[in-house]
């Protein structure tokens, strides 16, 4: 029989893509992403014994990853927390160490320019999560999810047009 | 970019991400747990050493001043506050098991706002401004009176000695600013 830690590591190994993607949209440099990755794993481990519904592991991982990242952004004074778009979006050193193609870089930079809440909404939308799941992860109503997705998409498209 | 182009690009990004092995994930978890525990143990150790040192000082000086009731009362109050602070710091160990990140985002943000509002605008938000200088003044008073080798009341009545205590106590600043404000008004 598997120990609790083995079970946790197996789940983490299968779902680690979520952690990487959340990290990617919230943190622009590698050391911050590494630190946050470790912090998310720790927070997941702490809440794992109390995880009741093993059918919604994905939602649980999104919830902890997004909450940990946003909390870290607010806590860490080295990183700027933005509610609105910055005036200039030309100065990006984002993900230069990753080997993404030009289109992927453009998309990531455009997402990075969204505010912290829209980033998570856009991420969940791109991951093709249902309105129900998004509502559960973010704690907002289903109707609000639709409105916020449209708003986030508009902002994203605007950012993409700036990127050209 | 259209919606389907966005999604295809996102799928490409997903495919490009380097996954960690289970061993690497295990190492990350172990390192983080150890780091958090060490940080906590360090802070608790400082708390314990300081509290034990202060309580030892308060008890030993109280024994040497058995006839001085005011001095002993001052030390007793300080001792009780130090003891409560020590108990609270042990209770904070429970924080290590806290799971506030396991909530929907809106709830988490609401909790943070509530907590911040409590700190900034709550009933006891300004308490520490009064409490910390008073406690430090009491500790300084305890040390000062003890090394003056006189009873508490005598030290307080001795103007020179009282001024020495004021110089070393944090109330000094506010007292002096009050005096200077008054003298400015007089002038």
Image (spheres, rainbow, N blue to C red):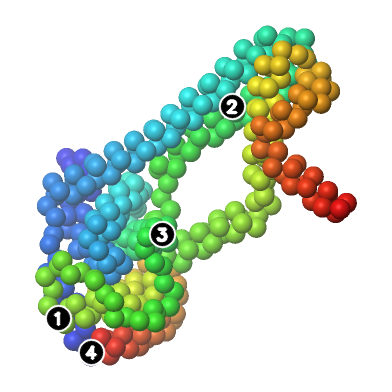
Alpha carbon separation for disc pair 2 and 4: 64 Å
Residue B145 in picture, x, y percent from top left:
71, 20
Q: Quadrant of the N terminus of chain A?
A: top left
The numbered mark 1 sits on a residue in which chain?
Answer: A
Task: Name the residue that disc number 4 marks.
Answer: A164
Asked if labels 3 and 1 share a chain, the reply is yes
Residue found 32% across the figure and 80% down from its top: A89
Residue A98 in picture, x, y percent from top left:
15, 68
Count neighbours of disc 1 (C-alpha within 10 A) and say few if under 14, some if 14 to 19, many if 20 or more: few
Alpha carbon separation for disc pair 2 and 1: 61 Å
The numbered mark 2 sits on a residue in which chain?
Answer: B
Residue found 75% across the figure and 30% down from its top: B163
Say which mark, if any, is on residue B83. 2
Which numbered mark, 3 or 1, is in the foreground of this view? 3
Q: Nearer the viewer, residue B137 or A33?
A: B137
The numbered mark 3 sits on a residue in which chain?
Answer: A
Which numbered mark, 2 or 3, is in the foreground of this view? 3
**Element class at badge 4:** loop
The reply to whether residue B103 is in sight is no
The reply to whether residue B173 is in sight is yes
Task: Name the residue that disc number 3 marks.
Answer: A77
Task: Name the outermost residue toward the right.
Answer: B186
Asked if labels 2 and 4 share a chain, the reply is no
Task: Name the residue that disc number 1 marks.
Answer: A102
Alpha carbon separation for disc pair 4 and 3: 31 Å
Query: Going by the image, does B115 lie left or right of B15?
Result: right
Q: Earlier in the sequence, mark 4 or mark 1?
A: 1
Count neighbours of disc 4 (C-alpha within 10 A) and say few if under 14, some if 14 to 19, many if 20 or more: few
**Residue A114 is drawn in which quadrant?**
bottom left
Residue found 69% across the figure and 52% down from its top: B123
The numbered mark 4 sits on a residue in which chain?
Answer: A
Q: Quadrant of the C terminus of chain A?
A: bottom left
């Amino acid at each position: 029989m598997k120990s609790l830690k083995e079970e946790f590591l197996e789940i983490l190994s299968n779902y680690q893509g979520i952690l990487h993607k959340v990290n990617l949209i919230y943190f622009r440099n590698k050391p911050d992403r590494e630190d946050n990755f470790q912090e998310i794993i720790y927070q997941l481990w702490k809440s794992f014994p109390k995880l009741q519904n093993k059918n919604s592991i994905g939602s649980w991982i999104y919830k902890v990853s997004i909450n940990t990242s946003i909390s870290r952004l607010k806590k860490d004074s080295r990183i700027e927390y933005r509610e609105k778009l910055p005036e200039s979006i030309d100065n990006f050193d984002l993900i230069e160490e990753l080997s993404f193609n030009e289109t992927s870089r453009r998309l990531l930079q455009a997402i990075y320019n969204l505010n912290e809440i829209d980033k998570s909404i856009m991420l969940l939308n791109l991951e093709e999560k249902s309105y129900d799941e998004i509502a559960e992860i973010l704690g907002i109503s289903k109707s609000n999810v639709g409105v916020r997705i449209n708003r986030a998409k508009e902002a994203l498209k605007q950012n993409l047009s700036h990127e050209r | 970019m259209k919606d389907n182009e966005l999604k295809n690009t996102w799928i490409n990004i997903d495919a490009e991400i380097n996954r960690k092995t289970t061993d690497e994930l295990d190492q990350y978890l172990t390192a983080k747990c150890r780091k958090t525990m060490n940080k906590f143990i360090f802070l608790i150790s400082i708390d314990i050493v300081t509290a034990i040192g202060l309580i030892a000082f308060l008890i030993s000086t109280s024994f040497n001043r058995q006839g001085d009731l005011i001095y002993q009362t001052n030390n007793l109050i300080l001792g009780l506050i130090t003891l409560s602070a020590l108990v609270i710091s042990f209770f904070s160990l429970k924080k290590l098991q806290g799971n506030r990140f396991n909530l929907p985002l809106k709830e988490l943000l609401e909790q943070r706002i509530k907590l911040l509002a409590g700190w900034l605008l709550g009933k006891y938000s300004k308490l520490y401004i009064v409490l910390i200088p008073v406690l430090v003044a009491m500790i300084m008073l305890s040390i000062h009176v003890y090394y003056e080798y006189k009873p508490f009341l005598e030290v307080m009545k001795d103007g020179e000695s009282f001024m020495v205590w004021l110089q070393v106590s944090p109330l000094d600043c506010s007292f002096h600013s009050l005096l200077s404000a008054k003298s400015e008004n007089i002038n």
